[in-house]
Amino acid sequence: MKVIMAEVFNSWQGEGGSVEGSAFGRRQIFVRFAGCDLHCLWCDSKEYIDASHVSRWRYEVEPFTGKFKYKPNPASVDEVVDAVLRLDTGDIHSISYTGGEPTLQVKPLKALMGRMKELDFDNFLETHGGLPELIREVAPLTDYASVDIKDETARATEDWKGLVLREVESIRILKEAGVKTYAKLVVTRETKVENVRWYASLLKDLAPLVIQPREPINITQEKLMGLYREAAQIMGRKNVGLSFQVHKYLNVL
Ligand SMILES: C[S@@+](CC[C@H](N)C(=O)[O-])C[C@H]1O[C@@H](n2cnc3c(N)ncnc32)[C@H](O)[C@@H]1O
Ligand SMILES: Nc1nc2[nH]cc(C(=O)O)c2c(=O)[nH]1
Ligand code: SF4
Ligand SMILES: [Mg+2]
């Protein structure tokens, strides 16, 4: 089975903060899929959005050496499994599937997740959650899920409200399947407080929320605190947290 890959590397999970279901600070092997159907203004993985332009993928030869080898796309699932296993440092919390949008290639995603479960690894899915019908397919193989709620200011798609409702539906499906799930909202200085109130009302009693400032950060502390407080007042003070992209400060992948 074939898959259009971007990269495979070993790092610490840099996002998720401290809410339940987060793997922040845990060691992970990252499997980044090429291709995405959204176009978030601030996406830090833009070079992988158009899968047809990702002619080769790279895998780390050894963790933290910065040395990569390249292979042509599409990859076989076996090649990806091999690339993951050579990065197993014995302290791996889970395998992270990210992208791009991993659920778009649901068949190879399921095959990879199944192989990793057989090898006794946990699966951590990083997704925009905009396609609940695909989430339903991978939920039984998923242990942890970080599902983005795309704020209006991301301008990910025209019907942003419809997207948010589908993301929440995906979270419901994952929760019902017993997946440790949290929602992640990337905020900018333009994020509207009334939108955060709406997201919080949809997530209340469903899943915790992390608020992650868009990098590079330009939101004021006052604005961030205000958005946080509104969300916490609706969802409960134990169900909201902050998340930063700490890997960017550590200068690791
Ligand atoms: C590149 S996305 C891939 C997974 C999936 N497509 C998604 O959007 O959730 C991985 C994570 O990085 C976050 N991210 C990407 N660019 C960012 C930026 N400039 N600032 C903050 N978070 C960012 C996304 O919001 C998402 O949570
Ligand atoms: N260290 C590290 N943590 C991450 N968490 C989410 C990432 C992503 O791009 O999906 C990511 C990433 O690219 N690197
Ligand atoms: S959904 Fe994820 S990969 Fe796609 S454009 Fe947005 S941040 Fe980037
Ligand atoms: Mg990233």
Image: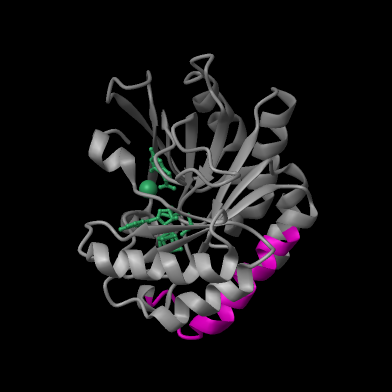
Left or right of residue 203, residue 120 in this image:
right
Q: Quadrant of residue 130?
A: bottom right
Q: What is the x, y in percent for residue 175?
A: 73, 55
Q: Is residue 163 highlighted in magenta? A: yes
Name the residue: 69% across, 59% down: 135
Name the residue: 58% across, 82% down: 162
Q: Quadrant of residue 129?
A: bottom right
The majority secondary structure of the magenta stretch comes to helix
Left or right of residue 138, residue 75 in this image:
left
> Is there any visible trace of residue 55 in the rendered image?
no
220 or 28, nearer to the observer: 220
Left or right of residue 205, residue 30 in this image:
left
Q: What is the x, y in percent for residue 116?
A: 66, 30
Image quadrant in which the C terminus is located: top left
Q: Is residue 158 highlighted in magenta? A: yes
221 or 43, nearer to the observer: 221
Residue numbers of the magenta segment:
155-173
- Way the structure is coloured: one colour
> Is there any visible trace of residue 54 in the rendered image?
yes
Placement of 144 over or under 198, stated as above or below: above
Placement of 241 over or under 17, stated as above or below: below
Number of marks present in the image shown = 0
Image quadrant in which the N terminus is located: top right
Placement of 94 over or under 197, stated as above or below: above
Q: Quadrant of residue 42?
A: bottom left
Name the residue: 47% across, 36% down: 30
Q: What is the x, y in percent for residue 239?
A: 57, 56
Left or right of residue 91, residue 190 in this image:
left
